[in-house]
């Protein structure tokens, strides 16, 4: 980009080139994300929390275009509030995921964001839904964002059914750390959210507290 | 991500592929999948062997355009055998890697192939060298390449340990290839592995149905 148009990052789209992951355990879910937001080659926000609440016990993880993802999350947050007043109780995770999917599908040509929706409700316990491109599918775990490609092999090998809450948290932290060390668009700190029947706990793991894997 | 784009820009038959090599205590394992595809849509060969022997105890793996890789390895074999006759001693692994690097660097405009060279020599024991697309050469204890390699960076970073035993390293390599083949649609088939040690060379072929299965398969 030439100098007279200003710095390159002013004209580049802001993307949450990112790594996001959500995993279900018996009694709840754990969500994790990195914190880097890039515009072209510049990092415009190094501490963004990409885990956005949709309701008390339902969160979504944002990836793709930052503006698109945030807008979808805000709209669904509003729609879920209205819905939960209408039904008189806490919404189901599947409802939240369906609302996200409806927007992603209807505007699939204009939007480029992928949200993973995860949470806990009374009926089905912990659930994780992927909503890529307007598809709605429930999975035991889901990864997304540019950094996810580097850790598909790791999560395929390491995931086991029936992990405990602590094992899931460690699994999420390990996966984020590996992806952040390989993907140029992922980095910063790791945000972890653990949702179960009793509580919703948000945690930040700073860069030097992340697990290190021996470099070649 | 860059590797995936490059592979889809390759004209003709490409080894959209997964290749890897890893050093263990006393030797090195080098391996690959066996699928050759045209444009990522048609599998032109299910059982191609991408692990090529360039000398008695030196093998290399190719990724990228199959035609380029075959041409370069043929030239490299010739250079190496001449070199070993002149030196009156088996060539060093780094010499083999350098020959490939020279060919890649001098013809960088026309070629689209990257190599992993692994072997054993009396001077430094087991070694692995990477020659990347533009002709850069460097040595690593473990390395992966090809379009399928993106999916296993995390796995290799987490699971590779220096000084593994032969069996542990073979299991690690088989697992890594199986995971990559499970996620990359242009890698597949059987896993070709070659174990090189001071005493010799052993080929291990793991057919598709004997590959390790992971949680959702």
Image: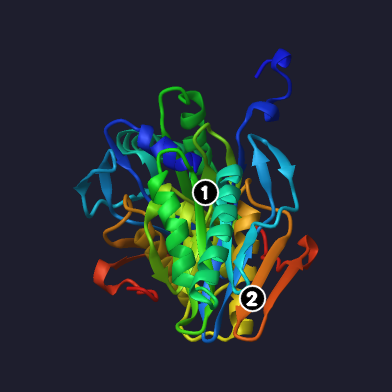
* Residue position for label 1: B93
Alpha carbon of mark 1 to alpha carbon of mark 2: how far? 50 Å
Residue B25 horizontal/vertical position (percent): 57, 70
Residue A192 point in image, percent of width and height: 67, 69
Q: Reply above or below: A187 against A42.
A: below
Front residue of A104/A40: it is A104
Residue drawn at point x = 39 percent, y = 50 percent: A105
Tell me if residue A45 can be seen: yes
Helix, strand or loop under label 1? helix
**Which residue, given by chain and number where applicable, does mark 2 sit on?**
A194
In this rendering, the count of numbered labels is 2
Residue at (46%, 64%) from the top-left corner? A97
Depth order, front residue of B133/B78:
B133
Q: Is residue A173 left or right of residue B165?
A: right
Q: Is residue A23 above or below residue A110?
A: below
Q: Nearer the viewer, mark 1 or mark 2?
A: 2
In the orientation shown, which residue stands out farthest toward the top?
A4
The answer to whether residue B89 is visible is no
> Callout 1: few (<14), some (14-19), or many (20+) C-alpha neighbours within 10 Å?
many
Query: Which element type, helix, strand or loop, lies under badge 2?
Result: strand
Quarter in which the N terminus of chain A is drawn? top right
Tell me where residue B33 sits by quadrant: bottom left
Q: Give me the chain letter of mark 2.
A: A
Q: Nearer the viewer, residue B149 or A125?
A: A125
Report which quarter residue A176 is drawn in. Answer: bottom right
* Whether marks 1 and 2 lie on the same chain: no
Q: Is residue A61 above or below residue B146?
A: below
């Amino acid at each position: 980009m030439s100098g007279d148009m200003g710095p390159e990052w002013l004209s580049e789209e802001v993307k949450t080139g990112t790594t996001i992951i959500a995993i279900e355990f018996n009694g709840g879910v754990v969500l994790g994300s990195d914190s880097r937001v890039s515009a072209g080659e510049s990092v415009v926000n190094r501490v963004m929390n990409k885990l956005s609440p949709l309701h008390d016990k339902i969160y979504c993880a944002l990836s793709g275009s930052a503006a698109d993802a945030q807008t979808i999350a805000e709209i669904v947050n509003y729609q879920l509030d209205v819905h939960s007043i209408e039904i008189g109780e806490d919404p189901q995770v599947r409802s939240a995921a369906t609302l996200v999917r409806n927007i992603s599908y209807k505007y699939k040509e204009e939007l480029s964001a992928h949200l993973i929706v995860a949470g806990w409700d009374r009926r089905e316990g912990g659930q994780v839904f992927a909503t890529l491109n307007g598809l709605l599918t429930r999975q035991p775990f889901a990864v997304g964002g540019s950094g996810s490609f580097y850790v598909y092999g790791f999560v395929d090998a390491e995931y086991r059914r029936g992990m405990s809450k602590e094992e899931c948290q460690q699994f999420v932290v390990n996966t984020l750390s590996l992806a952040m060390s390989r993907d140029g668009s992922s980095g910063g700190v790791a945000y972890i959210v653990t949702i179960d029947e009793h509580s919703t706990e948000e945690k930040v793991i700073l860069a030097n507290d992340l697990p290190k894997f021996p470099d070649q | 991500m860059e590797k995936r784009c490059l592979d889809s820009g390759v004209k003709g038959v490409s080894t959209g592929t997964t290749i890897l090599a890893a050093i263990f205590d006393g030797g090195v394992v080098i391996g690959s999948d066996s699928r050759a595809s045209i444009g990522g849509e048609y599998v032109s060969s299910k059982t191609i062997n991408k692990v090529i022997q360039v000398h008695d105890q030196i093998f290399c793996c190719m990724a990228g355009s199959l035609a380029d890789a075959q041409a370069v390895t043929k030239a490299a074999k010739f250079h190496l055998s001449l070199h070993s006759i002149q030196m009156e001693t088996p060539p060093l692994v780094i010499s083999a890697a350098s020959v490939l690097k020279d060919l890649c660097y001098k013809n960088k405009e026309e070629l689209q192939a990257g190599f992993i060279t692994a072997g054993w020599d009396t001077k430094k024991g087991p070694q692995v060298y990477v020659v990347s697309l533009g002709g850069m050469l460097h040595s690593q204890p473990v390395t992966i390449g090809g379009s399928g390699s993106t999916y296993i960076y995390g796995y290799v970073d987490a699971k590779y340990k220096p000084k593994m035993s032969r069996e542990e390293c073979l299991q690690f390599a088989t697992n890594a290839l199986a995971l990559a083949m499970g996620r990359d649609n242009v890698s597949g088939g059987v896993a070709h592995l070659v174990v090189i040690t001071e005493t010799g060379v052993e080929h291990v072929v793991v057919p598709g149905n004997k590959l390790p299965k992971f949680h959702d398969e």
